[in-house]
Amino acid sequence: MKINAAGYLENARFIPSPNYDERPPTCAISLLVIHNISLPPDEFGGNGVIELFTNQLDPATHAYYQPLRGLKVSAHFFIRRNGEIIQFVPCTLRAWHAGISCWQGRNRCNDYSIGIELEGSDMLPFELIQYDKLIALTSALLTAYPIRDIVGHADIAPNRKTDPGPYFDWKRYRQGFSSDDIRQNAQVDR
């Protein structure tokens, strides 16, 4: 996998989200945030997440969607249960995935982070193919950007969020990096 100069993952499916803006000037990408998401909750394979990130989610189709009416969110990447990677926002732009957040005393994590959503929940383990794709994507991101830390959403918004959840296997994830990735000095916070 490779991230090109414009911030796109080569060979990924790109579905543009309108929910992004420019990063602050001279704000380097230094943080990778891992999330989980499923819409409706604990249901996989549908288009709910895509519809949410593209402002097309119909609140009338599921009771859970009512409080999401008007919500404007996105992520850079979404890794489905089958391993498909969908990109919504180029890495060079600021996706709206972290919300009110802070990492090591620095607020507004969206400014300097890349967000990866895994199709999943706090209630079930992730698929092995998702780890394989996440590790490969992370390696590409570490090559392209000066990422120093890799965290879960719960680490940057501990009073609001729990993802990627108790079933995310941080050990398996960490063990997937090559010596070239470690050379980049990225710190996995687990």
Image (cartoon, helix red, strand yellow):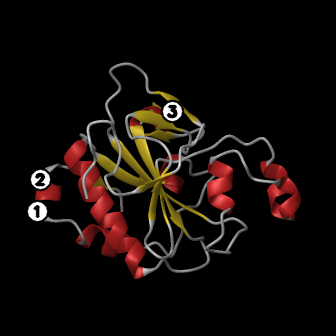
Left or right of residue 154, residue 186 in this image: left
The kind of secondary structure element at disc 1 is helix
Residue 88's tag is: none
How many tags in the picture? 3
Q: 185 or 49: nearer the eye? A: 49
User: Hey, which residue is sitting farthest top in the picture?
Assistant: 25
For label 3, the residue is: 108
Q: 109 or 45: nearer the eye? A: 45
Q: Residue at x 32, y 48 (%)?
A: 149
Quarter of the view holding residue 171? bottom left
Q: 73 or 35: nearer the eye? A: 73
For label 2, the residue is: 183
Contact (Cβ within 8 Å) of mark 2 with mark 1: yes
Residue 179's tag is: 1
The quadrant of the picture occupied by the C terminus is bottom left
Q: Earlier in the sequence, mark 1 or mark 3?
A: 3
Q: Residue at x 34, y 57 (%)?
A: 11
Left or right of residue 158, residue 112 in this image: left
Type of the residue with mark 1: Ser
Marks 1/3: CA–CA distance: 31 Å
Q: Is the residue marked by circle 2 packed among few (<14), some (14-19), or many (20+) residues within 10 Å? A: few
Quarter of the view holding residue 44? bottom right
Q: Residue at x 49, y 32 (%)?
A: 107
Above or below 130: residue 3: above
Marks 2/3: CA–CA distance: 27 Å
